[in-house]
Image (cartoon, rainbow, N blue to C red):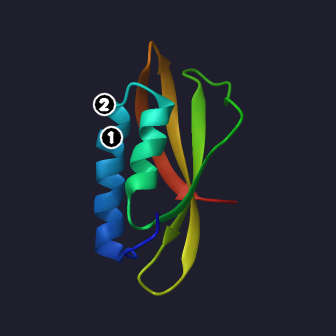
Amino acid sequence: MCGKPLSIVEYEAFEKTLATVINSARSLAEIEAWLKSQQCVKSVHLGNYLIKSNPPQRDFIVELSMENGLTVKKIVNLFDLDNQRFQFHKLRDEQ
């Protein structure tokens, strides 16, 4: 899964593409498969919880290989809009 590390510019492009993929996805499995297909992604884990908000939210924990040799963990947060529709919310640091 992990091949090419991300530069800062590529990270920004990754985030924009991620938003497009999530907004057009019809399942969490489709989102997970896309994440796993990215060369910079070392690991992907879907949180086993649903954040009870309006709309509900889900998190993917993603480990990314960065250009400087570091590995960073990020949380991909998305809204679960029901009827197999999703909306990207944010990409943030793991706490």
Q: Which of these two is toward me, 6 or 44? A: 44
Query: Can you say whether 36 is above or below 27 in the image?
Result: below
| Res. 3 image quadrant | bottom left
Which image quadrant for residue 67? bottom left
Q: Is residue 80 above or below residue 95?
A: above
In percent of the image, x 46 and y 53: which residue is there? 36
The residue type indicated by label 2 comes to Ser
Any mark on residue 21, and which?
1
Q: Which residue appears farthest toward the front when viewing the image?
A: 1
Can residue 32 be seen here? yes
Which secondary structure lies at badge 1? helix
Q: Name the residue rendered at 41%, 31% in the picture.
A: 87
**x 59%, y 24%: residue:** 56
Secondary structure at badge 2 equals: helix
Residue 24 shows which numbered tag?
2
- Looking at the rendered structure, the kind of residue marked 1 is Val
Q: Could one spot residue 89 in this view of the protein? A: no
Q: Position of residue 84 (x, y in %)?
A: 44, 18
Q: Is residue 27 above or below residue 4?
A: above
Label 1 packing within 10 angstroms: few (<14), some (14-19), many (20+): some
Percent of width and height locating residue 8: 35, 75
Q: Is residue 82 left or right of residue 45?
A: left
Q: Is residue 49 left or right of residue 6?
A: right
Q: Are the two marked residues, 1 and 2, in contact with CB atoms closer than 8 angstroms? A: yes
Residue 80 in picture, x, y percent from top left: 51, 25
